[in-house]
Amino acid sequence: MNLITVKPELHRFDSCREFAEMFQIGEKDFILASKSTYLKHFHDLNTGAVVAFKSDYGPGEPTDLMCEAIMADVEKSGCTRIIAIGGGAVIDIAKVLAVSDGNTMDELYAKAPALTRKRGLVIVPTTCGTGSEVTAISILSRVRLNTKLGLVSPTLYPDSAVLIPKLLEDLPFSVFATSSLDALIHAMESALSPKANAVTRMFSYQAVDMILQGYRAIAEQGPDARIALLEDFLLASTYAGIAFGNAGCAAVHALSYPLGADRHVPHGESNYAILSGVIRKYRQIKTDGELAVLGEKIAAALSCAPADAFDALETLLENILKRKPLREYGLTEADLVTYTDSVLANQTRLLSNNFVPLTREDILDIYQSLY
Ligand SMILES: [Fe+2]
């Protein structure tokens, strides 16, 4: 039985220059970056690499159509290595660029997991959320299906993941909040997954503890307290990535995808909108087992009684981001039924990792409880 796979080499640098020199970035490299980060930290390094900005291809979360446009430009460039410098959207597109060979996205999804690696792949995350730098999955909006779907293949593991904590200093608090909430949810969902084991849970629970300790500092001292803790948050995000890359995410992500794709809600925010409803439903069905262990870990981090852990967690998270009821995203009650059917039709990969099985009625009830 395989307990854990950690594929990419993991690197950490104080400066972008050290990274560029160590990785000998040059004209055979195709850098896909978020524009502001690139201009501030990499432009003056004059690496000679071909550079493209994600924002030139479209706003917001990555779509299959956006990917196809960038794939065409990579093909023309003749580059042999992809370097992603950005948040989840940039990273997820870069993974596809490393395996694309003139295919459409529909063809890649149809072939997966049997994809072939065409180019090298180096990932530099600039948020503290996705954990995607250490996973073999790329999540894209399928425009024609109106939901998000994971493209999964062992060939999507990057060759190298590069942590440069300094890059996170530019993150506005709102992006810090949504991305770190995503990491916390990766850690919680992977801890509760039936595919988890003692090794993957070590990463999950370490991430839960680091993120909650950081959130306590922010709640007590204000948003600027995060600056001294950015390396912790970046590491926690990577730990959570290792955990969910092996044990999987589950219902929170599954129920959040239709909201994210349909209403263009940032991924961490749409997950956060769903989290409390899923945990409440789990607790209605089963309170012991790993959910009790997770409650104890949260209680230890928040210095409260285990029985109060999930309520205390909700209170703490409200300090980081105000949770909006689903109606405030413009949904109707009929949309909740449509979303439920979409989850059941498209997200079986994630639903199989639920702490306890959820029925159609359970899923609809979760949405309604959050409305
Ligand atoms: Fe996520």
Image: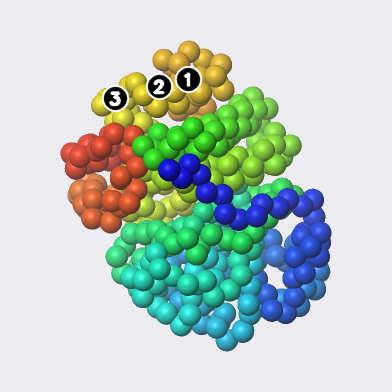
Q: Earlier in the sequence, mark 3 or mark 1?
A: 3
Circle 1: residue type: Glu
Element type where label 3 sits in the image: loop
Q: In which quarter of the image is the C terminus?
A: top left
| Place of residue 111 in the rendered image (x, y in percent of width and height, measured from the top left) | 36, 71
Q: Mark 2 points at which residue?
A: 292
**The image quarter in which residue 231 lies:** top right
Disc on res. 316: none
Q: Residue at x 70, y 37 (%)?
A: 229
Count how many numbered circles sit on residues in the image.
Answer: 3
Residues at marks 1 and 2 touching, judged by CB atoms closer than 8 Å: yes
Q: Which residue is drawn at 81% across and 69% down?
A: 45
- Front-lying residue, 122 or 71: 122
Element type where label 2 sits in the image: helix
| Place of residue 305 in the rendered image (x, y in percent of width and height, measured from the top left) | 48, 13
Q: Mark 1 points at which residue?
A: 296
Ligand 1 closer than 8 Å to the CB at disc 2?
no
